[in-house]
Amino acid sequence: MFAYLRPLLFALDPEAAHNVTMAALKSGLMRQAPADDPILATTLAGLSLPNPIGLAAGFDKDAEVPDAMLRLGFGFVECGSVCPRPQPGNAKPRLFRLVEDAAVINRFGFNSKGMDFAHARLSARMGKPGIVGINLGANKDSEDRTGDYVSGLRALAPLASYVTVNISSPNTPGLRALQDSAALADLIARVMAARGAAQVPVFVKVAPDQGEADWATITRACIDGGVDGLIVSNTTISRPALASRHAGETGGLSGKPLKPLALAALQRFRSETGGALPLIAVGGISSGQDAYDRIRAGAGAVQLYSALVYEGPGLVTRIKAELAALLRRDGFANVAEAVG
């Protein structure tokens, strides 16, 4: 059906098209995807995944449709970014399709209905099956952004399968400074202290645009601080050669042009961690081969979002079938055997 619906959706402003998609998902009419091939089952940071294909943060910002996305076949779903207080985000337009490049630029700026709204949504699905994580952000006008992550974790961690600390969005001024050595060590210490005895895994989401000295610094802070894994990577502020008229828009670039940069970042973090931290790969993944390449490069699981804009919901089932075939072709009995 997506082949027929795509021209209609693409006739709309991108953010309006997303809102239409969300309304369709809330209707509950989505079909259940076929059962997963057993070869795809895997474990990451103690989480048992039916398959390693996850929905990246940004699609379901306020935890409104996680179960609908699980029905589409995702092995896990990450909601958010959620900020403690509601905020509208940046002025519109703030989402751009780069059709010629199979890419997206966004500068949403952590638009969020707030922690209380997400808490209510996650509370309502308690007891339902499926791995649903929550991605935490900070309010733009916060005087203590690290404190925002602490309050978000305390409120939402008991309702989530895992928590991601997003310090790498390029659309909140100054946020990426939290990746600097001292700031990151302080953030991780406060967040992990807030987690206390809770068993929920905590991941840190990093940018692909690191300086040469930053890779080891981030890795060491995360390992020393007891973080459970890294999500590599967020959108990029760099601009490779692009054909779209929207190429000059400010914001984070995702989709196909991000693929080589995100893969290189994954390889670098795999080298720096030596396999000591689980890695989730994001950025430019649109096929089973892309997912397989990230797994072979060290990722225990992958996430996607932008490719759905161009390929539709059937992409998830297709990626899983292609990935299963590649694993069998190369003699692997499961995903974990292929990691790294």
Image (spheres, rainbow, N blue to C red):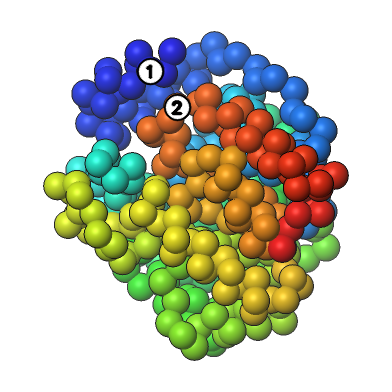
Expressed as whole percent of the image width and height from the top left, the position of residue 297 reads: 64, 62
- The quarter of the picture where residue 131 lies is top right
Q: Which residue is mark 2?
A: 312
- Residue 253 sits above or below residue 142 on the image: above
- Residue 203 sits above or below residue 175 on the image: above
Q: Which residue is mark 1?
A: 3
Q: Amino acid at mark 1?
A: Ala
Front residue of 91 and 278: 278
Q: Answer yes or no: do the residues labelled 2 and 1 have beta carbons within 8 Å?
A: yes
Residue ID at (29%, 35%): 15
Q: How many marks?
A: 2
Give the side of residue 325 with respect to residue 78, left or right.
right
Classed neighbour count for the residue bearing mark 2: other residues with Cα under 10 Å, few (<14), some (14–19), many (≥20): some
Expressed as whole percent of the image width and height from the top left, the position of residue 28 reads: 56, 14
Front residue of 296 and 104: 296
Q: Is residue 52 visible?
A: yes
- Image quadrant in which the N terminus is located: top left
Expressed as whole percent of the image width and height from the top left, the position of residue 227 reads: 70, 69
Helix, strand or loop at disc 1?
helix
Q: Amino acid at mark 2?
A: Gly
Residue ID at (74%, 42%): 329
Residue ID at (80%, 37%): 39
Residue ID at (56%, 15%): 30
- Image quadrant in which the C terminus is located: bottom right
